[in-house]
Amino acid sequence: MFKMTRQEIIEFIEANPVAWIATIEDGRPHVRALRAFRVQEDGPLFQISTPKDVYRQLAANPQVEVCFNDQAQGIQVRVAGTVRFVEDEAVLDEALEERPFLQSLVEKEGRDAVKLFVIADARAYSWTRDNNFVPKEWVAL
């Protein structure tokens, strides 16, 4: 059976940083792709913006699951946990430097319009077709 260790999951996320994130609003699911900024000791770190629906949805319901995928290898890693917004000016500076497209938003609405979050208390499950029908074994991140 295929099962990844914590370190293998972290390396997988770093190599495949685009995740599909599921949120809920008014009882309806909403899914979109987000790129993880990095993987920290306390979980994957993402950047979002306050004008976007995803920010409002996560602020209202911080329970979340994301799915990272490597289609060529046929591997998915699902990460579930609770969104915790991060207030770290140094990390925000790094995100703004790496993502210059945010500059116009910052100029218009200020730095507070850009938010960072981790999936705290994260647990991950690695999936392939080989373990499609076996009980899930979650790994703490």
Image (tube, rainbow, N blue to C red):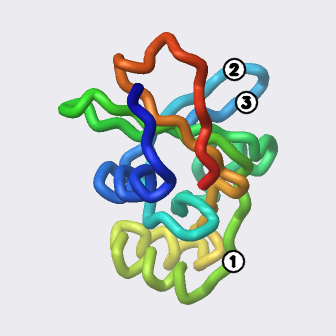
Q: Is residue 140 visible?
A: yes
Question: Which image quadrant for residue 97?
Answer: bottom left
Q: Residue 70, position in %: x, y?
A: 28, 37
Tell me the element at label 1.
Answer: loop
Nearest the viewer among 84 and 120 is 120
User: Does residue 36 appear to the left or right of 125 in the view shown?
Assistant: left
In what quadrant of the picture does the C terminus appear?
A: bottom right
- Residue ID for mark 2: 28
Mark 2 packing: few (<14 Cα in 10 Å), some, or many (20+)? Answer: few
- Residue ID for mark 3: 25
Whether label 2 touches label 3, CB < 8 Å: yes
Amino acid type, callout 2: Arg
Q: Residue furthest top?
A: 133
Tell me the element at label 2.
Answer: strand
The numbered disc on residue 1 is: none
Q: Residue at x 35, y 36 (%)?
A: 69
Q: Residue at x 68, y 71 (%)?
A: 86
The numbered disc on residue 87 is: 1
Badge 1 or badge 3: first in the primary sequence: 3
